[in-house]
Amino acid sequence: PGLRAQSIAELAARRTPGYAIGGLAGGEDKRLFVKVVAQCCAALPADRPRYVMGIGHPLDVVICSALGAVRAVCCCCWCWYCFCCWVD
């Protein structure tokens, strides 16, 4: 949490048009996932969009929205599609 908090503080100071929240691979414990997204959304400027990159499950899109992210993309749906198309 210390390094993430430091990173959030430094990024927020830059006042970019928006912020991407990463470092979540979709396989971590759901409590840790919620904790990280909540920490980031709470600390990043509320007047800028917060985007969660490459989350693992469609329900996580709803969770991210409830925590304050304005956009999230689920990578597993695409991966499952690609995998199923290549495997007979």
Image: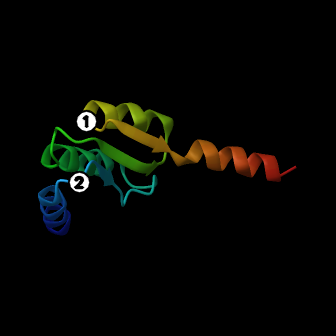
Residue furthest to the right in view is 88
Which residue is located at x 17 percent, y 54 percent?
15
* Type of amino acid at the residue the image marks with label 2: Thr
Foreground: 35 or 17?
17
The residue mark sitting in front, 2 or 1, is 2
Q: In which quadrant of the rendered view does residue 41 lie?
A: top left
Q: Which residue is denoted by mark 2 in the rendering?
A: 16
Question: Measured from the top left, where is residue 36 in percent x and y?
Answer: 25, 52
Q: What distance separates the C-alpha of mark 2 from that of mark 1? A: 20 Å
Number of labels in the image equals 2
Q: Judge the density around disc 1: few (<14), some (14-19), many (≥20) Cα neighbours within 10 Å.
A: some
Which residue is located at x 25 percent, y 36 percent?
67
Q: Classify 6 as above or below 77.
A: below
Q: Report if the CB atoms under discs 2 and 1 are less than 8 Å apart.
A: no
Q: Judge the density around disc 2: few (<14), some (14-19), many (≥20) Cα neighbours within 10 Å.
A: few
Q: Classify 19 as above or below 66.
A: below
Q: In which quadrant of the rendered view does residue 46 lie?
A: top left
Is 3 displayed left or right of 34 in the figure?
left
Colour pattern of the rendering: rainbow
Question: Measured from the top left, where is residue 14 in percent x and y?
Answer: 16, 60
Q: Quadrant of the N terminus?
A: bottom left
Question: Measured from the top left, where is residue 69 in percent x and y?
Answer: 29, 38
* Type of amino acid at the residue the image marks with label 1: Leu
Marker disc for residue 67: 1
